[in-house]
Structure formats: structure tokens, C-alpha cells
Image (spheres, rainbow, N blue to C red):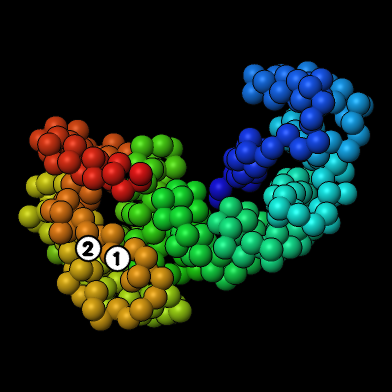
Amino acid sequence: MLCRKMKSLALLLLLFATMPLLGADDPGIAQAIAQGVALHDAGKYDEAIAKYREALAADPGNVSATYELAYSLYAKGDYAQCTTLLQPLADMPGVLQPAVLTSLGNCLDSGGHPDEAIAAYRKALAIQPDNPSFLFNLAITLSGKGELDETRELLKRNATLRPNHASGRYLLAQTFDQQNFRAAALLEYLRFLAIEPSTPRAKEAAAHVVEILHRGVSSDGGKNINITVDPDSRKEEGDFGSWEMMISITGGLRFTKESRKKSEFEKTRDEVSSALAVLLETRSDLGTNYTTTQNIPFFVTLDEQKLLDAFAGDVLLPLDLKGGDAWAKKNAAALQQYRAFIAAQAR
């Protein structure tokens, strides 16, 4: 599961770093706040807090000092004081109210009050319904409570609004998988790996990709390959039953005599590449849903650019499978072209 502290700190950093120094016309107050920010950035939270309190002693209603103080208290893990500071500001109308509400939600959530945090996030979203950061924060808290249907819908909106948000895609892939949407989960993990290909999370995502490809496929060690397809696979995210069957058949090919001659990396890369090739051939039969409108076009573009094979190998490199280094050296030019394409997409 995604770390809530990472989520909260990332959002608070964005919010507090971009807020103007409201009420800081006095040069002394402005200087104290600026010094506090510099100390916070240096990891000296106690000294930063002292500077903000100095500013508030001179101007108790200074909004910027209050925000920054809450941020430093949050960084120290003092969620109770962070909450106390922000609650009086949460009902103040104005352009900063949604930011206050979502920051308050972060403090409440990290402080062990998810229901109150959810209420704060919902109030922020009522003001800015298409703010992806607010959608993502609410999704994380709902996910922690096991409310996965709404989590899924929020994360789909987040991914539609900001396609390159890696954490959102990772949590969405996990949610799809938890809810037994095999095809949607597989493609979401792959989209995540295109954005974040070489981190500990990437290794976990790549392992999930392999597990999904091999799900329901086994061999007795002889000529018999067993393929089991889940009859209860959910359809709310589209009917991918035929493609899921083809994924399993493709996964079963690893047990054939011909495949045994290949390295583990080559076998797995072939499975990813073949599964995507079949998907593109049958995409016209998959209807209109989140996956067909938001993810499949990405793979269509890779295919058009003749980068699908490089992608299929690159997403597996974090697993350090036998044969991966040799493949990467042999396909260095194709990998460089693929990575340049992905970098351009992220701009």
C-alpha cells in the first residue's frame, strides 16, 4: 500500500511552497517567516517553529506564519498541533480554503482520524471537484478503510487529469488487482512502469505484471499445461474475458519445449510483448471504458513508433531476470529510442 506520509508531505510541500506571505507586510515578520522556511528546508524543524512563533507573536493573525508552522509541525509528526492550527482556518471562505481543508485532512488522516479527514477532503473537492491532488488524497484515505469502489473511481479521475502521476497509477493498479480486474490491473501496472521504471516500487510493479501474466497457468512438469480462467472476473471495467484467456495461453507457452531453451528474461519479455500484440489486434471489440480510452491508446502509439518490444523488455529489467543484461546490451539502441520517447511524453 502507498505510504500516507509520503502523500501528505508531497502535497503539503506543494501547498506551502506556493502560498504568498499573507499579512507579512511588516519587514520583520516577513524576514522571520523567510528564515523559518530556510530552516525547515534544512531539516531544522524546531528552529523553524521558533521563527514562525516569533512572527505570530508580532502578528497573531498572520496566515502565512500559521501555514508554515503547521507544515513544520506536520514534518515533526505533531499531527494534533497541526490540526489545531488549521481547523480555525478551514471555514474561512477564500481562494486558500480548499488548500487549508486538504492540508487539514492530511493532518487528521496521519493523526489517526480518517473519517474526519474524509470530511475535510470532500469539502475541498466540493469547491474544486477536478483538483487531482484532492482526489488522490481522498482515494488514499478511502483505500485504507477498504472502500475500494469509490477509491477506484477517484483514481481513474486522477489518472485522466494527470496521466503521468506515478503514485496515482500505482495505487489504481493495486486497486484494480484487489478487486479482481485482471486486465485493467495489468495495463495499469505497465503504464506505471513506463513512468517510473527503476525504483523499488518499479520492481514490485514488474513482479505484479509477471504474476498476473502467469495467473491460473501451471504445468505438471511434463506435457500437460493447465490453464484456469476465473469465471467470476468482474466486468464493470469492461469485458476483457477473451483477452485474459489469451494472456493465460501466452503464459502457458513458457512450458513448451521451444521456450525452455530461452532465458527467463526472454520468455517473460515474449509474454508481455505477445499479450500486448493480441490486445491491439482485438481492441475494437473491448468497448468504451477507462482502460480502452486512457491506457490502450498509449500502447497503440508505442506500436506505431515500433517501440513495443523495447517497452516489453524495459519494464522487466527491474526484476534482474537471467538474460536481462544481455538483452539490454543487444538492444541498447532500441532502449535509448524508447526512453527518449517516454521522456518527451513526460514534458
Q: Quadrant of the C terminus?
A: top left
Measuring 38% from the left and 43% from the top, which residue is drawn there? 196
- In the image, residue 108 above or below residue 6: below
Residue type at tag 1: Ile
The location of residue 193, given as percent across then percent down, is: 35, 48
- Residue wearing tag 2: 300
Say which mark, if any, is on residue 34: none
The location of residue 189, given as percent across then percent down, is: 38, 55
Q: Is residue 139 visible?
A: no
- Badge 2 crowding class, 10 Å Cα cut-off, few under 14, some 14 to 19, many 20 or more, is some
Q: Do tag 1 and tag 2 residues touch (Cβ < 8 Å)?
A: yes
The one nearer the camera, 136 or 244, is 136
Give the side of residue 48 with respect to residue 213, left or right.
right
Say which mark, if any, is on residue 296: 1
Measuring 22% from the left and 59% from the top, which residue is drawn there? 301
Residue type at tag 2: Val
Give the side of residue 37 with respect to residue 344, left or right.
right
The one nearer the camera, 237 or 219, is 237
Q: Is residue 104 visible?
A: yes
Measuring 41% from the left and 55% from the top, which residue is drawn there? 163
Residue 138 quadrant: bottom right
Give the side of residue 90 with respect to residue 268, left or right.
right
Give the side of residue 328 with respect to residue 289, left or right.
left
- Badge 1 crowding class, 10 Å Cα cut-off, few under 14, some 14 to 19, many 20 or more, is some
The location of residue 29, given as percent across then percent down, is: 81, 24
